[in-house]
Amino acid sequence: MTANPQRDQFYRSIEPESLAPLWLRLKTLVPREPTPTAVAHRWRYADVRPRVLESARHITAEEAERRVLILENPGLRGSSQVTGNLFAGLQLIMPGETAPSHRHTQSALRFIVEGDGAYTMVDNQKVVMRPGDLVITPAWRWHSHGNDTAGPMVWLDGLDIPLAKYFGGTFREEAHERATAGDDPAPLPPIHFPYRDTRAALEAMRTGGRIDSHAGCVVRYLDPATGSWVMPTIATMMRLLPAGFTSAPYRSSDSMVFAVVEGRGVIDIAGAAFDLAPHDVAVVPGWLTYTIRADDDLVLFSYSERAAQDKLGFFREQRL
Ligand code: 1HN
């Protein structure tokens, strides 16, 4: 270890007393900058889709409760995490299936990938889902899913599961455990953001020349009642990068999960290039510099823990 046997003896002697010297750990505990263990990664939808569909041959949505293939970051194996703070998965619901009602303290988003017209129930509100739509399940609201259509439906689930765990706020309840049937839920914030509206807002930005050099045209999903992000922990955005545009290098403290809606391009994350095609999911760990090149008009949905970082005073960004 060190060239100081008395010190080493001191360290060994205090360890059984559940004591440890901070000075050996300070620089790792409080690094100069974020040191994510998650890595940059891209899941090609062309590869993942057959696996998602295959899962329906092995289990029903009913039995699984939620038939989801977790997008697990290769740097965080076994953690069920896509980044240091968030969960991602692809959920499949086949024609005629239902996923039973439950609720949990974690906030959830669904970003619709394929299929048309399956629904999710949030408390008493039914939301019919179409590709590119964003649907929110706020914390502790009952929710179930169903598919009355003729085709499979797939969406990206984003949840703040790791954050709920760090904060000691992890609770779940299932419909059959429900105490009283008739409790009157509080009004819901906006929970459905149809793609048609989001796409039109992006197009208006492009037409108006409001194109940010580091991001392209960007809209944020906000709750009009508060003017803040629609979920307390997770920030959601949609961006359009016009064909031929390359974003200037940028980094931020939040870890980004991108889902391609339309178009093709390339994301370069700290020197590693990943091509992007519709429905691919790419992850940028916090504080890694990235650029995005659009080969066609490229539309990207994203979510990150920025909403929590903003509130806690942790958020930083750098336009390079
Ligand atoms: C969940 O409840 C859903 O309600 C999706 O669709 C994904 C991942 C982990 C834990 C709960 C859903 C989930 C989940």
Image (cartoon, helix red, strand yellow):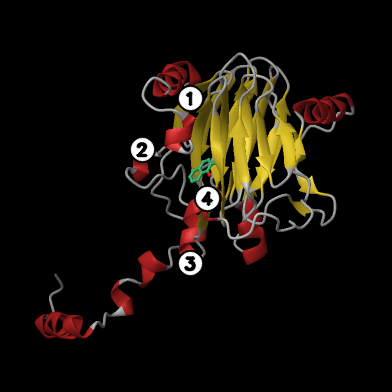
**Which comes sooner in the sequence, label 2 or label 1?**
2
Respond yes or no on whether mark 3 lies under 8 Å from ligand 1. no
Looking at the picture, how far across and down is residue 133, in whole percent?
71, 30
Looking at the picture, how far across and down is residue 138, in whole percent?
66, 51
Write down the residue under mark 2.
74
270 relative to 113 in the view: left or right: left
317 relative to 229 in the view: left or right: left
At x 87%, y 27%, the residue is: 204
Give the distance between the C-alpha atoms of the residues marked 4 and 3, in whole angstroms. 24 Å
**Which comes sooner in the sequence, label 2 or label 3?**
2
Three-letter code, disc 3: Gly
Give the distance between the C-alpha atoms of the residues marked 2 and 4, in whole angstroms. 36 Å
Looking at the picture, how far across and down is residue 146, in whole percent?
61, 30
Q: Considering the numbered disc 3 on the image, is that residue within a helix, a strand or a loop?
A: loop
Give the crowd class for mark 2: few <14, some 14-19, many >=20 residues within 10 Å.
Answer: some
Three-letter code, disc 1: Phe
> Split into 4 quadrants, where in the image is the C terminus?
top right
**Which comes sooner in the sequence, label 1 or label 4?**
4
For residue 176, which numbered disc appears in the image?
4
Q: Would you place residue 198 above or below residue 9 in this image?
A: above
Three-letter code, disc 2: Pro
Write down the residue under mark 3.
168
Write down the residue under mark 1.
274
Residue contact at pointers 1 and 3, CB within 8 angstroms: no
At x 68%, y 51%, the residue is: 231
Q: Nearer the viewer, mark 2 or mark 3?
A: 3
Name, please, the residue furthest toward the right.
208
